[in-house]
Amino acid sequence: MTAKAKGLQAPSETYETLMKVSWNFNYESQIAKLDDLYQRAKENQWNAAELAWDTPIDPASPIIASDHSQYGAMPWFQKLSRQQQETFMAHSTAQVLSQFLHGEQGALLTAATVAHGVPDMKAKYYAATQTVDEARHVEAYDRYVNKIAIHYPMVPWLKQLIDATLQTNNFCKVMIGMNMIVEGLALGAFNNMYRQTEEPLLKAITFNVMRDESRHVSFGHVYLTPTVAALHADDREDLAEFAYQAVKILIDGQAAPMDAGFLKVLAVSGIDPEDFMAGMQEAAEMGITRELPPGQIHSVKDLMMPALVRAGLVTARSKAKFEAAGIPVNADLTILNAMEDRKSELNVLNAQQAAY
Ligand SMILES: [Fe+2]
Ligand SMILES: [Fe+2]
């Protein structure tokens, strides 16, 4: 895999936001579990530079084999030439990995924002470790994406969702947008990538990143659940409305027309976008995309919605809005509980079992 998708790198961008900064001269935490999370964050640090970066990636052996992919069983994919199949698998995987890379940069920005704004001292400590974690994740995915030499731009809805989060000037909303919604999405996506790929370097990166992300999702719960419970109902409603709007950006984005990056994937693979759409429609009608394979996690249903419900961030009013938008409010915590950080490093593997 050496082809480069050139000319797609977005220019750097800056914008101004209001930044709430909170000093706190009470060095005690108001939430006992935060210290436990912070201690584990320090104990579970790892060095991305020490992974086996010299692992050769065999161009004849795709990062995701087509029989592990959602596309492999679809008639339109099976009708492609072998070379088209290989090119499409390589570039569509690179497009997904590019989203991981850009999303990690967004997480670095939000984690630093939380460290500034959150008043609880141990929450500041924790947000500082998350900022380091996210820097390491950017480092690892940047290096991997460079190694496979195929770069794709950030999909517009993911950028819009993280920008909406960064622009709130409310650390609770930043944590809802990142630690519950984007990281709920990421945890499911990393789990699914971990199961789909046999490429050892990507498997190692994903395993390590997933363990950190499970802790980040736990931080959202440990901090926000008691904080939201103590709020005035009007303030809780304001957060619930933000959560609804953020999930809606994600759902609408996933249903939006293909972005420039994915159109490029199709172009380099010699696939007409209309043929692709018709093929996906046909596969959906055959039921191929309706059920995820065993062990694959549906981020919105299994992670994001239960996390919002548990934290008191779905009110009667916002529940009605979710349902009117066709987004079921699932409160079953089984998979979320299994994925979140526990004392053992085996929690990620345990979650793989629970997902069946
Ligand atoms: Fe991350
Ligand atoms: Fe994270």
Image (cartoon, grey):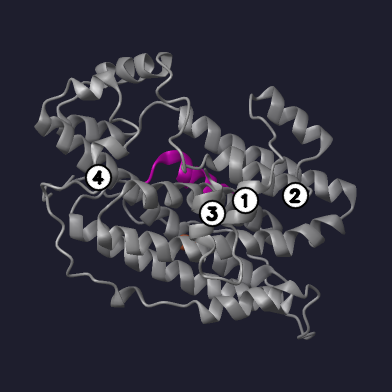
Magenta-span inclusion, residue 163: yes
Where does label 4 land, which residue?
A: 8
To which residue does mark 1 refer?
336
Proximity of marks 1 and 2: CB atoms separated by less than 8 Å: yes
Query: Alpha-carbon distance for marks 3 and 4?
Result: 36 Å
C-alpha distance separating marks 2 and 3: 19 Å
> Marks 3/1: CA distance?
8 Å
- Residue 34 percent coordinates (x, y): 70, 73
The numbered mark, 3 or 1, whose residue comes first in the sequence reads: 1
Q: Give the range drawn in magenta.
A: 154-164
Q: In which quarter of the image is residue 247?
A: top right
Residue 261 seen:
no
> Nearer the N terminus, badge 1 or badge 4?
4
Secondary structure found at label 1: helix
**Can you identify the residue that label 2 sits on?**
310
Q: Which of the two labelled residues, at mark 4 and mark 2, occupies the earlier sequence position?
A: 4
Amino acid type, mark 3 = Ala
